[in-house]
Image (cartoon, rainbow, N blue to C red):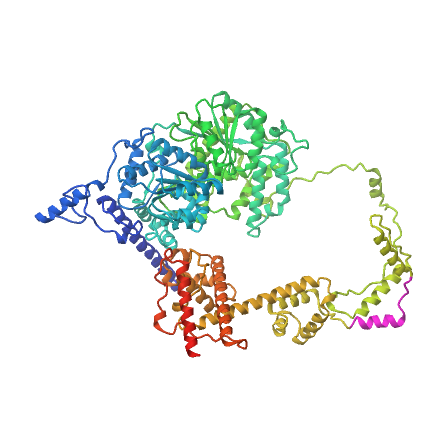
Amino acid sequence: MDPAQESNSGTHANNVQGALQQLDLLVEKAEHYAQVKLIGSGTKDLSSPSRIKQEQPISSPTSHSFGDHRHRRTEKEEDEELLTETKHSSSGIQRFEASPWYVKGGEMRDYQIRGLNWMIQLHHNNINGILADEMGLGKTLQTISLLGYIKHCRHKHGPHMVIVPKSTLSNWMNEFARWVPSLRTVSLIGNQDERNQKIQEEILKKEWDVIVTSYEMCIKEKSVLKKFHYIYLIIDEAHRIKNEKSKLSEIVRDFRSQNRLLITGTPLQNNLHELWALLNFLMPDLFSSSEMFDDMFKTDNDHEESLVQRLHAVLKPFLLRRIKADVEKRLPPKKECKIYIGLSKMQRDLYTKILMKDIDVVNSVGNKVDRLRLLNILMQLRKCCNHPYLFDGLEPGPPFTTDHHLVDNCGKLMLLDKLLPKLKQQGSRVLLFCQMTRMMDILEDYCLWRGHEYFRLDGSTPHEERQISIDEYNRPGSTKFLFMLSTRAGGLGINLATADVVIIYDSDWNPQVDLQAMDRAHRIGQTKTVRVFRLITEHTVEERIIMRAEMKLKLDNLVIQQGRLVEQKSNQLQKGDVLDMIRHGANYIFRSKDSDFKDEDIDIILARGEQKTAEMNEKLAQLGESNLRSLKFDTADENGAPTSAYIFEGEDYREKQSRTSLLDGWIEPPKRERKANYAVDAYFREALRVSEPKAPKPPRPPKQPNVQDFQFFPPRLFELLDKEIYAFRKSINYKVPRNPDVGPDGERDRLEEQARIDEAEPLTEEELAEKEELLTQGFTNWSKRDFQQFIKANEKHGRDDLEAISVDVEGKTPDEVKRYARVFWTRCNELQDVDKHMAQVIRGEAKIQRRAAVKRALDLKMARYRAPFHQLRIQYGTNKGKNYVEEEDRFLICMLHKLGFDRDNVYDDLRLAVRLAPQFRFDWFLRSRTAMELQRRCSTLITLIEREICDLEDRTKQRSGAGANNLSLTPANSGPSNTSTVSNQKRKSTSAGGIGSDSTAEMSGNSKKKKVTA
């Protein structure tokens, strides 16, 4: 073996071994949590297993501690144990075998009671967890029953906070009132005035047990919500915080709470990093590093099975997940049917135009195409599949009418126009999900035209209207046939189980989102079989989108939901994937001219859809994991021969393309249609090559030299050139045209211009020679590019730094630049855009002066301390803020001065220095700041330092007299007494007033020293 390869293989083996060792340590800690749950030990710390202390079990007087074998107790020990049991008998773990007595709205199901017992066990041992039951199994009820247990069995009246999506907030309030009415709840929602009134009258008075609010209100009212120390902090639809760098994730981590609970029906949507974000929120000490967590699960197939088992061991103590098929046997099934629809003629023409407009992109090879451009084409094609009226100017009008054209120009609406009456006749009620709100506007017009009673819910629907619409739709005897929802806003936590039909008008990229939409109807309380109709436009990008989503969902079921490993790259939409989607069906579209929609009976369409759905499911079942990971739809037929999505009617179009074109994936544009020419005169003129008679051209003016204002020719040259132009106009008898739109002033100017032409004389021999001489006296070798470089160099370095300017102006010697600069600053007012150029230079010089002032302030500040990283103090005044402590500010300023504040990318280097600093290794707030946030904080600190230096200079001038121009600053911290800074202060306990008083004392101490010296 080659030594280099042997070294690489050894390094890889070491990396794998290191990852396995780290995972073993994580599993050991997780097993310790499981042990705590098993033996009933408690801990006062909600996140760190290292702080768990063993307590005497309270469930049995004969219990043994973990690992203990035979042990004879003395009489004294037994008496102490009995006393302890008597003292703490009320705090033992309580298990429910039936629905708890405080749950009033009905009986909880057996698996819901088991979920409640699981959460009670977590609470008793101060362990946070994730309730991850599949959507529709009653996670809301289980959570409410837990809070009821804490109030009625543990005798703790809160406070608790529940953070939920805006669309489900009213439903949560209703569920609290229905199931555990003894819990006092308050909701924080509404506009600014309503929120302020509720905060003053209800929240701050603390006469409540549970506060329910939305993600948006949590961000807006964080200052109020931070005032309370919660027993439970609960987040519904917890994948909202799957990005640990989002604003909501940062804010909820700042809330103080004893326990945390996450609720989500899809704990793993895309990759394991999102799972780490949830676990980090629950247990930041155990799951501290995302990089380490990701590295643990990057390995080869040889270690796959062991990693799967260990991941299960890690998750087991913290996550409870049940699916409907396992626990809810009484729930009717869900049946999905994919209906394939053709394009209308207008849609086909529009689809072709979109492809033809970017045919160079469609036929591109390699990675030369911008991904954003591809995604834009994909979005336009999806809009075309939904409805052509989504493009401005295609709807006939004005006047705009709601008529048959609304249906006839869209294949999907033609199908809906057949499907909805049949469903209405069968007594079904429909949920219609759509991605685009503008498409919902068109669907609204259609429903009004056809007389379908409906409700609409999207992201802009006010909170009050949402709950009113949901309650009215679910009301017994409701006449509303259709509920129209946007997939993102209406797919979370809403209970619409009175509907039994779900129509997915256009599918989402993420199949989990569509599953959430379906489960609005397929949930507890549903008494009918739920039918799901997914509309797909045939031979378009939608087929590829659906295929990719189905394969991704199957991969999730095979891999992610089993706790196995998925590379993140398989979930990302690459440029090649987008291009493949765009190309799919393009040749078919180009070959066809008329509508593809077949006017068939709806039963025939549905039967064909069921057949195609079964075929796709059968193909998906044949796919191996390798196909799914690469998202390739190649399978084998019943004879074992390989088949592909490119094989159509027995012909492999990939081979055909390679034979007919050198470019892989070439899309042939439609043939050009030749139109007959009925212009007789133009035909004979073309045939006989006879041209039209042309008017005589006036004599051309003399060729003027190309003279630019930035070349600074002598002013006399421009006088001679103007004289030459006027003489030429006189020679051709040119008359200044009269403009009827101008007033008397314009007419006067015209007459003056005409007089100058009439009085003009040609240049004499002496003047011609003078002109030639003057043409040599300007900066003829300075181009526009040279001039722009000169202006930018002045902006960058200032007008006085000619040496630096000479370096930036390419191709010019320092003497040439200096000579040009002297003329420029003397005659710059002759330039046409002088104001623009001067503003550019002045703006740059102001930045230079600003940098010099900041450097001087930082130098003076640092000079006052022998050890600035330990001794530096900042006078905050009233600008302390609540997020940063002085230890962090001190490090930022000192490190910024050390790195050089005016250096390029200095704040990226500062961010790296923060992450490498050992004193901040557990400071999640500072380590998670971006370079832009650090820059804003440093700008604030620099302003405070400049103000401090200015005040010191003013005081020095007042003491030393008007003649003292220099500031003499002695080190402020010359002794050890000043070395005790605020390094031990807590983020919340430090007040601006305290720091201000310390700074004032320091200033007064320095003043006393100076007076004594004087």
Residue 1001: image x %, image y %? 40, 67
| Relative to 824, 329 lies left or right | left
Report the front residue among 402 and 295: 402
Identity of the residue furthest to the left in this view: 75
| Relative to 351, 964 lies left or right | left
| Relative to 59, 288 lies left or right | right
Report the front residue among 680 and 806: 806
**181 in magenta:** no
- 402 lies above or below 374: above
Residue 429: image x %, image y %? 47, 25
Report the front residue among 690 and 151: 151
Report the front residue among 545 and 481: 481
Q: Measuring 85% from the left and 56% from the top, which residue is drawn there?
A: 749
Residue 595: image x %, image y %? 62, 31
- 450 lies above or below 636: above
User: Which stretch is magenta?
Assistant: 759-776
